[in-house]
């Protein structure tokens, strides 16, 4: 029976391709598969497969209305020489822990893992559903999604992409990556607000029916490349399956042995993918959800109350500076026993008063998860000590996870083999990383590019092409807007007047 998607808030069901095209359900809910399919190959069989082959085995189970040929062609288009390593997602051991490096794509952050395939999935989905209108991808980014989405969608026929980022909330390299993005169908906008403002503005446009009709008359329809899109979530399940099967094939773990997974978390997409992998049958023990000083998820896992009414803190792991973790709604739905009414109530409370509390029964169903958070100083210390002990350099986001994992292990004594999702290249956050290693690098005589060369030297890792290209790339974008000016910017870009 074909797997369909339903909304966490009860709207009508959709096929996988419809869900990918829409991004968000009409009722504001997120699409979830009616059931989580079980893997139909053994881990030993999967352990013999390439990344692309594993991707097919996982994704075919979720994207049921894609033909084998369609899906294989999407996968082949995505996981190719754009990645600087054949294995796509290498595992690196340091201090007895496995770092799953998810940053070998075009923009050197883990968003590439899904955003390199999403345009292919979307174009295929548009064809399957006879969509004639131009697809307008609208995205809010805390820094990494935007660039990865633009890199994926730039000059893809039949699409436009508009990216909103918090003007003062991303790293200089991240901003430069975005502002130098080429492509006639691309617009980048710095908003005077934080990530949540950008995300709220995008969500509002998505659920504005009048705007939808206006767009349709002009020949456009919105879609989302944000991590709420099922076309983002599904490709992220792949690398957990791949990592586990590699560890097994290489004899690092035994048959049936569990692993713990620690994920530096913002919007809750990456860790949710790990949870789905577990529900598919992957032997994962604990899912350790690592937050930075914006510890709303840590508090949620410790108390059962989600409360975004708090100060928004800018940290050196900006892609995790988030107070509304959108994908958590899918977990809430699951632990509510797939109850759309309950989920809608809680989400309404979140939008009206900024908080909600789950029931005791729901809390009990969260036992696969464990929340932790790390302060700035702990992350810097982790980067420094890991480098000193092993020579391996991690970025600031991965450092949050590594610090949280250390504390988890110390407090619980749990020695289960551990995988840490390594979500960005240290080159992307080079200033923070280098000053963590030695405060002298914070001096004014070190500009970002000399720090890049220095990192390459001390870590003995070549400068990634993505950073090399930035050195001389011209800045092509300078659009800014206020929080409430997002819709006008969109209309202007689409030539719709205002
Ligand atoms: C997006 C991002 C995260 C957070 O991932 P979520 O799926 O939003 O939880 C962590 N680290 C980096 C480097 C990112 O770009």
Image (cartoon, rainbow, N blue to C red):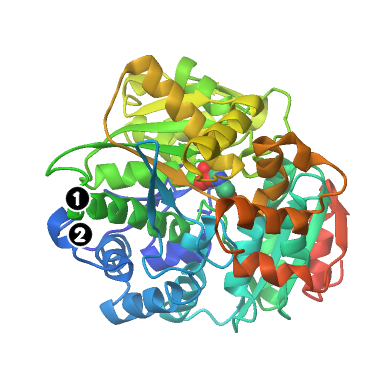
Q: At 22% across and 37% down in the image, what residue appears?
A: 258
Mark 2 or mark 1: name the one nearer the start of the chain.
Answer: 2
Q: Quadrant of residue 45?
A: bottom left
Q: Is residue 373 visible?
A: yes
Residue corresponding to mark 2: 47
Give the residue number, with chain letter if any, for mark 1: 248
SS for dot 1: helix
Above/below status of 405 relative to 425: above
| Residue 5 seen in render | no
Residue situated in front as seen by the camera: 345 or 418: 418
Residue 81 placed where, x, y %?
Answer: 47, 77
- Quadrant in the rendering for residue 486: bottom right
Expressed as whole percent of the image width and height from the top left, the position of residue 467 reads 67, 64
CB contact under 8 Å: marks 2 and 1: yes
Q: Residue at x 70, y 22 (%)?
A: 310
Quadrant for the C terminus in the image: bottom right
């Amino acid at each position: 029976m074909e797997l369909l998607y339903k909304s966490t808030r009860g709207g009508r069901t959709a096929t996988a391709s419809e869900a990918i095209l829409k991004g968000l359900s009409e009722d504001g809910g997120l699409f979830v598969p009616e059931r989580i399919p079980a893997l139909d190959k053994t881990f030993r069989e999967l352990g013999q497969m390439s990344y692309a082959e594993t991707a097919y085995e996982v994704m075919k189970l979720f994207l049921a209305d894609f033909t084998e040929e369609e899906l294989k062609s999407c996968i082949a288009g995505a996981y190719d020489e754009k990645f600087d390593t054949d294995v796509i997602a290498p595992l690196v051991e340091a201090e007895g822990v496995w770092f799953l490096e998810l940053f070998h794509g075009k923009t050197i952050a883990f968003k590439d893992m899904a955003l390199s395939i999403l345009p292919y999935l979307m174009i295929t989905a548009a064809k399957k559903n006879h969509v004639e209108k131009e697809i307008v991808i609208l995205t809010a980014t805390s820094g990494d999604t935007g660039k990865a989405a633009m890199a994926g969608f730039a000059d893809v026929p039949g699409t436009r992409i508009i990216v909103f980022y918090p003007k003062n909330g991303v790293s200089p390299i991240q901003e430069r990556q975005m502002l130098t993005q080429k492509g006639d169908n691309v617009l980048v906008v710095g908003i005077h607000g934080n990530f949540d403002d950008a995300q709220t503005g995008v969500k509002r446009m998505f659920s504005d029916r009048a705007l939808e009709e206006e767009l349709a008359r002009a020949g456009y329809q919105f879609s989302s490349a944000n991590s709420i899109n099922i076309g983002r979530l599904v490709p992220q399940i792949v690398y957990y399956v791949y990592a586990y099967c590699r560890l097994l094939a290489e004899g690092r773990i035994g048959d049936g042995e569990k692993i713990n997974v620690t994920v530096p978390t913002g919007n809750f997409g990456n860790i949710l993918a790990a949870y789905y992998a577990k529900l598919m049958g992957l032997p994962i023990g604990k899912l350790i959800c690592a937050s930075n000083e914006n510890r709303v998820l840590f508090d949620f896992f410790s108390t059962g109350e989600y409360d975004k009414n708090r100060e928004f803190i800018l940290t050196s792991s900006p892609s995790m500076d988030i107070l509304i973790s959108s994908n958590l709604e899918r977990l809430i739905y699951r632990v509510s026993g797939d109850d759309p009414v309950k989920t809608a109530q809680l989400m309404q409370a979140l939008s009206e008063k900024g908080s909600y509390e789950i029931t005791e029964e729901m809390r009990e169903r969260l036992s696969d998860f464990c929340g932790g958070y790390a302060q700035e100083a702990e992350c810097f210390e982790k980067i420094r000590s890991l480098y000193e002990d092993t020579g391996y350099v991690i970025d600031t986001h991965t450092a949050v996870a590594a610090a949280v994992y250390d504390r988890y292990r110390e407090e619980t004594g749990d020695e289960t083999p551990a995988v840490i999702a390594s979500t960005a290249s240290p080159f992307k956050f080079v200033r923070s990383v280098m000053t963590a290693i030695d405060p002298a690098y914070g001096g004014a005589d070190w500009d970002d590019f000399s720090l890049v060369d220095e990192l390459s030297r001390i870590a003995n890792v070549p400068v990634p092409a993505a950073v090399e290209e930035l050195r001389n790339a011209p800045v092509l974008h300078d659009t800014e807007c206020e929080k409430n000016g997002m819709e006008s910017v969109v209309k202007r870009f689409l030539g719709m007047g205002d």
